[in-house]
DNA sequence: AAATAAATTTAGACTTGTCTAAAAAAAGGA
DNA sequence: TCCTTTTTTTAGACAAGTCTAAATTTATTT
């Protein structure tokens, strides 16, 4: 098994690899982990010795097969626990993150597989992110940032990029939730704001919002 | 909040105080924690500085009000998670301990109170131990060790003292479970074994068993 | 290509919780 | 009481994971 810290690094590298496919830099990882670059170097060396990552000095880091599998397992746990919290324990989608960050480190294969079964093998977490199955496979979602749609496009809201409580609460306040239909009515070049139709209601949203909301174009 | 290690010490001291009411000795605590006496001294000093325990050199240790409240909260979490694992995730009562030992350290008041509600505010865990409510109160159970009954006594099985997987599996194999009625038919002075009636079936059990099974005399 | 800036690594230190070995205190026996 | 044994504490060390400050490598600019 891996230590709590090792698990958090693996998860962070996995997430950053989506953006930096050529390898994750020490500084990027330090920022994600909210730590110092020197600490990252130390840990990356350790992960490298354990064959969890591919690392050469000054060249950034990538997950090995072993490391990726471990990361996916942690993400599976995180997302299943989020579903549990929302579906069974009355948590709102903006309240689940910190608790799931703790629960994702519980080690028990039976626990997580039974939890999966108990929840009915959900495919997505409350933020629309796919949940890996026990073999580590998960659906690749064809989603687009709302900001990338053009006038006249419409689709349904399928996920969020930023899942901070502040952003999620903003969405709640504006009645934007997963599954709702959105149509782009206007785009303002100057500040990149948009006028959208949200199930019959017109709403003006800033680029900060449209850059963090995923849409499945219909 | 307290560290994982601190929480485990508090829990261990709480359990040992049931036996050593005058104060828990360093060696007793070392054995319970599966560590060395010197490590215990170090940690006990730390807990004492944090006002969680009352400690004077060479005099053993007792929980303060603060420490007791913290210990009870951890025990509450442990036992609620055990109920969850058995009632919702198809765990057997001999499988829950290790996972609950991890889950008891998750920090979230909302989580544990919602879990309590979700489970229907259970009063006892799968081993018959009382579950403290959110205020820290729990029912004191009037239970007796089977070994302390005399011939002719009868009662129902309400708990186990040893909750190791090995012991619980032994009970399963012999169809002894909580709620079942037991009557003492014979007691053997020589080896302290007993002949009991378990719902119509006669069964001879060794002292190791009768010393670890709690009965509510009827 | 040299100079500067930025990113990364190394060296050494600190904290937490543990250990071993030795010292000190308490308890028990004659 | 004095001597021995047991218990407990102290002293010093270690591993994990972090930090700061300094050194090194890579990247960028002119």
Image (cartoon, coloured by chain):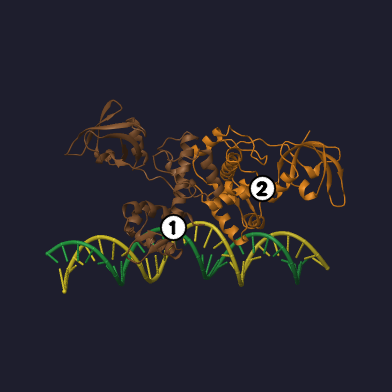
Chain colours: A brown, B orange, C yellow, D green
**At numbered mark 2, what does the secondary structure look like: helix, strand or loop?**
helix
Question: Is residue B104 visible in this depiction of the protein?
Answer: no
Q: Nearer the viewer, residue A108 or A182?
A: A182
Q: Position of residue B12 (x, y in %)?
A: 62, 50
Picture quadrant where residue A184 is located: top left
Q: Residue furthest front?
A: A218
- Give the class, few, some or many, for how many residues have Cα within 10 Å of label 2's Cα (few <14, many ≥20): some
Identify the residue under disc 1: A67
**At numbered mark 1, what does the secondary structure look like: helix, strand or loop?**
helix
Closer to the eye: label 1 or 2: 1
Q: Position of residue B8 (x, y in %)?
A: 58, 51
The C terminus of chain A is located in which quarter? top left
Q: Chain of mark 1?
A: A
User: What is the tally of numbered marks visible in this picture?
Assistant: 2
- Separation (CA) of disc 1 from disc 2: 44 Å
Identify the residue under disc 2: B17
In the rendered structure, the answer to whether residue B1 lies left or right of residue C29 reads left
Q: Are marks 1 and 2 on the same chain?
A: no
Question: Is residue B203 visible in this depiction of the protein?
Answer: yes
Q: Residue furthest top?
A: A200
Q: Chain of mark 2?
A: B
User: Tag on residue A179?
Assistant: none
Q: Nearer the viewer, residue B49 or A209?
A: A209
- Give the class, few, some or many, for how many residues have Cα within 10 Å of label 1's Cα (few <14, many ≥20): many
Q: Nearer the viewer, residue B48 or A169?
A: A169
């Amino acid at each position: 098994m891996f230590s709590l810290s090792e698990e958090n690094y693996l998860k962070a590298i996995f997430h950053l690899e989506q953006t930096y496919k050529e390898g994750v830099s020490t500084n990027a990882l330090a920022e994600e982990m909210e730590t110092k670059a020197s600490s990252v170097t130390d840990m990356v060396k350790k992960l490298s010795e354990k064959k969890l990552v591919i690392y050469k000095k000054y060249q950034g880091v990538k997950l090995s097969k072993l490391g990726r599998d471990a990361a996916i397992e942690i993400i599976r746990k995180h997302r299943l626990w989020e579903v549990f919290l929302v579906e069974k324990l009355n948590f709102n989608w903006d309240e689940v993150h910190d608790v799931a960050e703790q629960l994702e480190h519980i080690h028990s294969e039976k626990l997580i597989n039974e939890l999966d079964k108990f929840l009915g093998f959900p495919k997505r977490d409350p933020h629309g992110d796919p949940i890996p199955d026990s073999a580590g496979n998960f659906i690749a979602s064809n989603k687009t940032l709302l900001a990338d749609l053009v006038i006249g496009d419409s689709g349904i809201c399928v996920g969020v990029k930023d899942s901070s409580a502040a952003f999620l609460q903003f969405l709640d306040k504006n009645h934007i939730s997963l599954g709702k239909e959105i149509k782009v009515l206007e785009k303002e070049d100057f500040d990149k704001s948009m006028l959208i139709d949200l199930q019959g209601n017109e709403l003006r949203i800033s680029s900060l919002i449209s850059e963090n909301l995923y849409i499945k174009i219909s």
